[in-house]
Amino acid sequence: MILENNPIPIVTEKELNFNSIILYMDLDAFFASVEIREQPKLKGLPIIIGGDPITKRGVVSTCSYEARKFGIHSGMPISQAVKLCPEVRIVKSTHGLYSKVSKNIMKIIGYYSPKIKVSGVDETYLDLFDIVSDYEEAEKLAYELKDDIYASEKITCSIGLAPNKILAKIASGVDKPDGLKIVKPFEIVDFLAPLKISIIPGVGKKSEFFFNKEGVYTCGDMRSLSLSKVVHNWGKSGLRLWKLVNGYNTEEMSDDKFSRRDCKSISDERTFFNPLTKWKDVWYYLNDSIKTIVSSAQKKNMQYRTITLKIRFRSFKTDTRSHTIPCYCNDERSVSYAIKKLLLEYKDVKPSDIRLIGVKISNIRKITCEQRTLEKFFNK
Ligand code: DCP
Ligand code: MG
């Protein structure tokens, strides 16, 4: 039974703990940003993506932030949007391009954490628990991610950093576009208090109406209600919201179905159609592969521990040998050393029997800002 004067009833141990740092990324006006990138003359104009520019039929997929100032939004009939802003430009959508951009961006994000949950074409959650040690590091990582995305696709995104997925998503929306908002565990209550109750995912128009009827407009209003009233009026879902606005962790660990993305290797291969006669020549091509891989990893700020040598013989038999070093590295010397060591195992083979050689680095992780600073310091 819940007592009126009991301030924190039925809050479990788990709900008092925040162990993770979650990053939520959402691209800004995604389809519109891609179209503006493709046609820079559209920059700064109110534009709509979707429907037919000639007949002005269909619905708005999305619109630029300039168009949003007129009250235009996704899902609105284009006829209505044109009434709100007669000079609005209507741009037909090019879906193939959006999915290509989305895939590229998700690949970049995958380099930052193996724990990634893509939740839509332009949005993703990353669990940074194993990657950073505090919010300061998480902030640096978030800025790097924003820069990487912009450098690659010339579009901006907004990021929320918070102890759980719900809060990270809410945070990402408050400084849009090109925003970065951090909500640390002890800031949750003050952060949520002025925000409309409908900001919480799952609170739709209907529930908002019922909350408003009871005088609950903001998260702060919800917080000021007694728990017994909340539970009496709105049952379990009310209790969940009450806990959220009071700064408890309402997310079960089992909710965090992050998939582990193991797109974590970089490789390079060379095929010799004409047989090589000397080991010196084999090494020349291997060295070239090593240089290509190391430079690609350095550009992506990746470190690695496992180095693999692949050899395919003229008989098409393929051999791979790997070497894992005790600590992460990202220099040419370590890869070269490991490959030389692995190559020694083939010293009795005739170079002319080799059809293909390949080098792969795996067991990869993104270098955090702190590690990079340390490396720079030691390499001075
Ligand atoms: N989209 C759509 N129809 C909708 C909503 C969205 O086709 N009713 C498409 C177009 C959007 C993309 O999905 O560009 C991503 O949706 P978002 O809700 O993230 O909206 P935007 O990225 O466009 O804008 P924001 O800056 O608010 O994230
Ligand atoms: Mg978006």
Image (tube, rainbow, N blue to C red):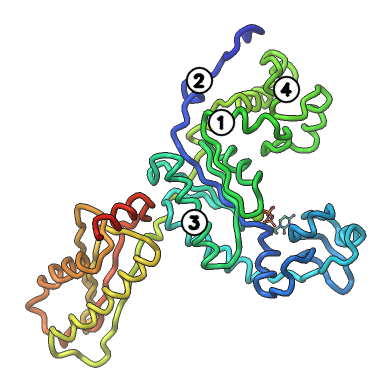
Residue that label 4 marks: 234
Disc 4 from disc 1: Cα separation: 26 Å
Give residue 187's mark: 1
Q: How many labels does the image show?
A: 4
Judged from this view, the residue extending furthest toward the left is 348
Pointers 3 and 2 in contact (C-beta within 8 Å):
no
In the image, taking residue 9 as reference, residue 54 lies left or right, namely right
Q: What element carries label 4?
A: helix
Sequence-first tag of 1 and 2: 2
Mark 1 and mark 3 lie on one chain; the one further toward the N terminus is 3
* Of the two numbered discs 4 and 1 in the rendering, the one whose residue sits closer to the viewer: 1
On the question of residue 295 being in view, the answer is: yes
Other residues around mark 1 within 10 Å, as few (<14) / some (14–19) / many (≥20): few
Describe the element under mark 3 as helix, strand or loop. helix
Per the model, the C-alpha gap separating discs 4 and 3 is 40 Å
Q: Which of marks 2 and 4 is nearer the N terminus?
A: 2
* Image height of 211 relative to 293, above or below: above
Measuring from the top left, give residue 17's x and y in whole percent: 47, 27
